[in-house]
Image: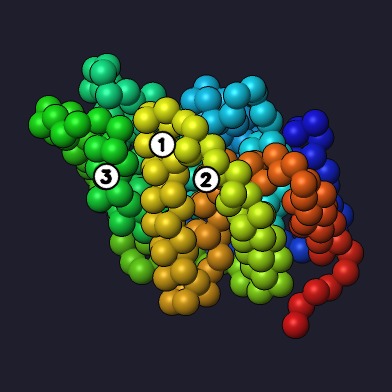
Amino acid sequence: MLPVLVLAYVALNFFFPYHIPSLNSGFGFYGQLLPEQSLPSQISAPVLILLNAVLINAIFNRNGFMEKNNYLPALLYVVSKSYFHSFYFLNSFGLAETFLVLAFLQIFKLDQNLDGRKAVFNAAFFTGVSASIYPMLFLFVPALFFVIWVLRPFVFRESVLTAVGFLIPIIYAGSYSTWFGIPIRGETFVGGVGEWKLPDLYVIGGGLLLLLVTGAGVIRQKLNQSSIRLKKLFRILLWTVFFFLLLGAAELLLLKRIDSVGIVIGWIAFLIAYSFRLKNLQQIPVIIFYLILIFSVGKFFVSFEF
């Protein structure tokens, strides 16, 4: 049903415009690759959202976050991302997020007892591509080393491969911008003009926070019963969410943008999926989810601006 849900949101925004394409949306060091108002932009953005949802859910199931396969993370990701501009129009943030998901797909392959050189290089390479498109993600580099060292002991060769993997796309992107005379300005690092929709932030932020709070007990119980590796994966999730919340808060305060806050949605979906396993209060997270879903659709018909 995910493709149907994605198409439904795209159709709603097409017939009842709520998210408007930006006239100034760059792709980091690559400049103005694709205007948001173009048809390829409006097709590729939801396709990437669907791809991200599938990959995030694959990471969730392959790493045994629950005893049985569960498809809630993908659903929660799609519904939550429908509040953000990059769901409907391809911009630097949306494209960079896909490469970040690919990077984490590699990171979650790491194991204490297996050779990690290929995985760390690929993870760093995808992160470098992501940062070249959305340069604010240069700030993620220290966190990249940290999450790798959570799963792997410090190995000098792997650390060198991480640095090399990250620098290769950055060098290419720098050469590209120099060759084609693309100026590096302030907007290069933030991807142009973003949308500022305060009601959306209140609803999605408040709804996800409530789901996290209701599921905290289940997460704590799961951690007590989990393996050492799964505890490390939870640690990576929590630090990743914390880092991107800080980055999103900085952009929100300084640049009046909320798109970068959306980068935590995929990883919070891992955590809030546990909210639906409550035995005594199972209806509470279901009600919260339906309220988020209703608002995500209702905003196309009713103005909630204030």
Q: Residue at x 49, y 25 (%)?
A: 63
**Mark 2 — residue?**
220
Label 3 neighbour load within 10 Å: few <14, some 14-19, many 20+: some
**In front: label 3 or label 2:** 2
In this rendered view, identify the residue nearer to me: 82 or 114. 114
Label 1 neighbour load within 10 Å: few <14, some 14-19, many 20+: some
**Mark 1 — residue?**
231
Q: How far apart are marks 1 and 2 (CA)?
A: 11 Å
Q: Residue at x 37, y 36 (%)?
A: 232
Quarter of the image containing the C terminus? Answer: bottom right
Check residue 146 in the rendering and tell me which mark sits there, or answer none.
3
Looking at marks 3 and 1 on the same chain, the residue that comes earlier in the sequence is marked by: 3
Q: Which residue is drawn at 56% across and 55% down?
A: 262
Label 2's element? helix
Q: Distance between the residues labelled 3 and 1?
A: 15 Å
Label 2 amino acid? Arg
Label 3's element? helix
Q: Do the CB atoms of the residues marked 3 and 2 lie less than 8 Å apart? A: no
Q: In this view, does 78 lie to the left or right of 187?
A: right
Q: Is residue 23 left or right of residue 306?
A: left
Instruction: Give how far across and how far down residue 265 sits, in percent.
Output: 57, 50
Label 2 neighbour load within 10 Å: few <14, some 14-19, many 20+: few
Instruction: Give how far across and how far down residue 1 sits, in percent.
Output: 80, 31
Looking at marks 1 and 2 on the same chain, the residue that comes earlier in the sequence is marked by: 2
